[in-house]
Amino acid sequence: MDKLFAGIDVSRDTNAVFLMLEDGTKHSSFTVNNNLGGAHTLCQRIVSALYEKKLSAALIGIEATSIYGETLMYALREDGSLSKFDRKLHVLNPKQVKKFKDIHPDLPKNDPVDAFVIADNLRFGRISREVYMDDYRYKALQTLTRARFRYVHNLVREKQRFMNMLFLKFSGLAQEKIFSNNYGATALALFDQFQTPDELANMSLEQLSDWIAQHGRNHFQNPQEIAKAIQAAARGSYRLPKVVGDSVNQVMAISVSTMRVMQSHIKDLDKAIASQLDTIPNTLQSVPGIGPVYCAGIIAEIGDINRFDGQASLAKYAGLVWTERQSGQFTAQFTRQIPSANRFLKYYLCEAAASLVRCDTEYKRFYNLKYNEVNRYQHKRALALTARKLVRLVFRLLKDNRLYSPAARG
């Protein structure tokens, strides 16, 4: 099949395009605006080249550049003139493009040259999996799950900043495990309401016990013992100069407010994710321990399971594959996971695997087995290997469209 290769270097304002023939010769190069009109012009130029050279297929590739190429891909997918040909769309990893360009170190760094390198990548078959855009429900779901991913990671960072401030304000409370959750409603109310360790240390035990019972809505079995522990920790805490303490209190109040807002947004996203997931029939939710959020994150990144040749291909896409270090009789025990991966899919697979370790006896047994095999990176290694085991289950359930059963654990 005679093909045309179109490399597009995307930027915020313009797109540089290089059209290449199968023998590596240049057909044309040009620049269009990165807007709807520019996309129409691009499609017309590609179609014109296909007719001119009597070609039947076009491989179109862009380098992954934040969001600037995403709308262009939609325009190329929806353009009716291109749909008459065998048209494939690809998004290339920037590291992959750079390594390919390193073969020609004398090439200058500019947009037309980058477009040429992308087209040459396509010609040599150094391409990633074709962009799956036939069903936009997956993209809608992906938008929600990736937003949740970022909110969760921002919340984790905010919690770390909060704990740093807590040590400054109440070092003893930061050191002692008094509350099961330092971000729970009662703990946050305590850290927010009491400005100095002396306020807690000098408060009567009865008053503090009543305060804990009231704010804990009587969920604490022995509020008096908790009050004693809090006062002991407060007495052992460092004292800050008043001007410094006031600034720490202000930062902590803002941090508490920020965490509450983030938690509220995550709950809203969870509802939207569950609603969008309902539009995509799947059997993954039949696995005990994989709720709608983890299920949605996995499905959104995989898209159509038929894109993958097998479970090994899916595992590589998720980055759950390890490099090999071997020379002669030596084989390294510790090797790195491949760096080129879909980090969102890897995250949701690992989170789902952690949930399965808590809910499924076989996955718990497997995790413990891998945990005890080594004495370094035990949890990280065991969880990654458990996620790799989960990939086999995910692939089989989605490929066969069947419900979970213990025999299909993988």
Image (cartoon, rainbow, N blue to C red):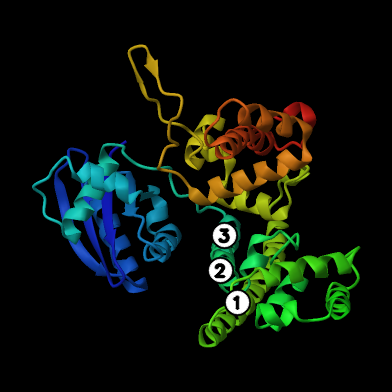
Dot 1 amino acid type: Thr
Q: Nearer the viewer, residue 252 or 385?
A: 252
Q: Is residue 138 left or right of residue 217?
A: left
* Kind of residue at disc 2: Glu
Circles 2, 1 touching at the beta carbon (< 8 Å) = yes
Q: Find numbered disc 2 in the image and state the secondary structure of the residue it sits on.
A: helix
Residue 101 location, quadrant? top left
Q: Residues within 10 Å of mark 1 (few under 14, many from 20)?
A: some
In space, the residues marked 2 and 3 are separated at their CA atoms by 14 Å
Q: Can residue 302 be seen here?
A: yes
Q: Secondary structure at mark 1?
A: helix
Is residue 54 among what the camera can see? no
**Residue highlighted by disc 3:** 149
Looking at marks 1 and 3 on the same chain, the residue that comes earlier in the sequence is marked by: 3
Q: Residue at left 38%, top 59%?
A: 81
Residue 228: image location, x then y, percent: 81, 68
Give the distance between the C-alpha atoms of the residues marked 1 and 3, in whole angstroms: 17 Å
Mark 1 vs mark 3, foreground winner is: 1
According to the image, label 1 marks what residue? 258
- Is disc 3 surrounded by few (<14), some (14 to 19) or many (20+) residues within 10 Å? some
Q: Is residue 386 left or right of residue 200?
A: left
Which residue: 77% across, 26% down?
407
Q: Secondary structure at mark 3?
A: helix
Q: Nearer the viewer, residue 90 or 175?
A: 175
* The quarter of the displayed image where residue 283 is located: top right
- Asked if labels 3 and 1 touch by Cβ distance under 8 angstroms, the answer is no
Mark 3: amino acid: Phe
Q: Which mark is residue 158?
A: 2
